[in-house]
Amino acid sequence: MVAHRLAAHPGIAAVYSIGGGNAAIVLAFAQAGRRCQVFIGHDLDVDNAALLKAGAIHVVLHHELGQDMRRACQEVLRAQGALPALN
């Protein structure tokens, strides 16, 4: 799919990837003979860490699901008055 988009849109020079397959996206740019100027991925897994170290992707947004869930539950409890409001 990325290869088709690159062929159809020669101006594409950046990627924001919310899912997996980042290595394939990097490969599609290379096969098209194009440089991805900015590549933002999600989740600091083994694959993305390797791509980041290699300079193939530029930024990885990492979410700690446990911490995110804890914060969400705390906010629900605050809204219900079960926890004090933050100042």
Image (tube, rainbow, N blue to C red):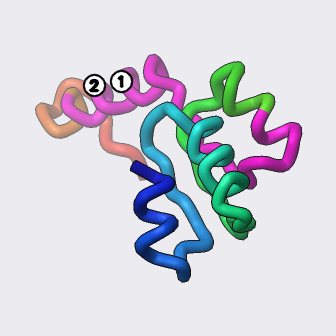
Q: Quadrant of residue 65?
A: top left
Magenta-drawn stretch, dominant element (helix, strand or loop): helix
Crowding at mark 1 (Cα within 10 Å: few <14, some 14-19, many 20+): few
> 2 and 19: which one is in front?
2
Q: Secondary structure at mark 2?
A: helix
* Residue drawn 53% across the image and 78% down it: 10
Q: Residue furthest left?
A: 80
Which x, y percent locates residue 2? Answer: 46, 53
- Give the residue at the far right of this rendering: 54
Q: Is residue 5 above or below residue 60?
A: below
As helix, strand or loop, the secondary structure at mark 1 comes to helix
Rate crowding at label 2 as few (under 14), some (14 to 19) or many (20 or more) other CA atoms within 10 Å. Answer: few
Q: Residue 83 in the image: state x and y as whole percent.
A: 28, 28
Mark in the foreground, 1 or 2: 1
Image position of 46 (left or right of 21): right
Q: Residue at x 42, y 58 (%)?
A: 4
Query: Is 84 on the left or on the right of 55, as rendered?
Result: left
- Cβ atoms under marks 1 and 2 closer than 8 Å: yes
What's the residue at 17%, 39% (across, down)? 79
Q: Closer to the camera, 65 or 17?
A: 17
Q: Which residues are magenta?
A: 51-76
Magenta-colored stretch includes residue 8? no
- In the image, taking residue 5 as reference, residue 81 lies left or right, namely left
Q: CA distance from mark 1 to mark 2?
A: 6 Å
Residue 56 is a magenta residue? yes
- Which of these two is toward me, 12 or 75? 12
Q: Amino acid at mark 1?
A: Met
Residue at the spot of label 1: 69
Residue labelled with disc 2? 73
The structure residue drawn at horizontal position 39% and vertical position 30%, both measured from the top left corner, is: 71
Relative to 23, residue 45 above or below: above
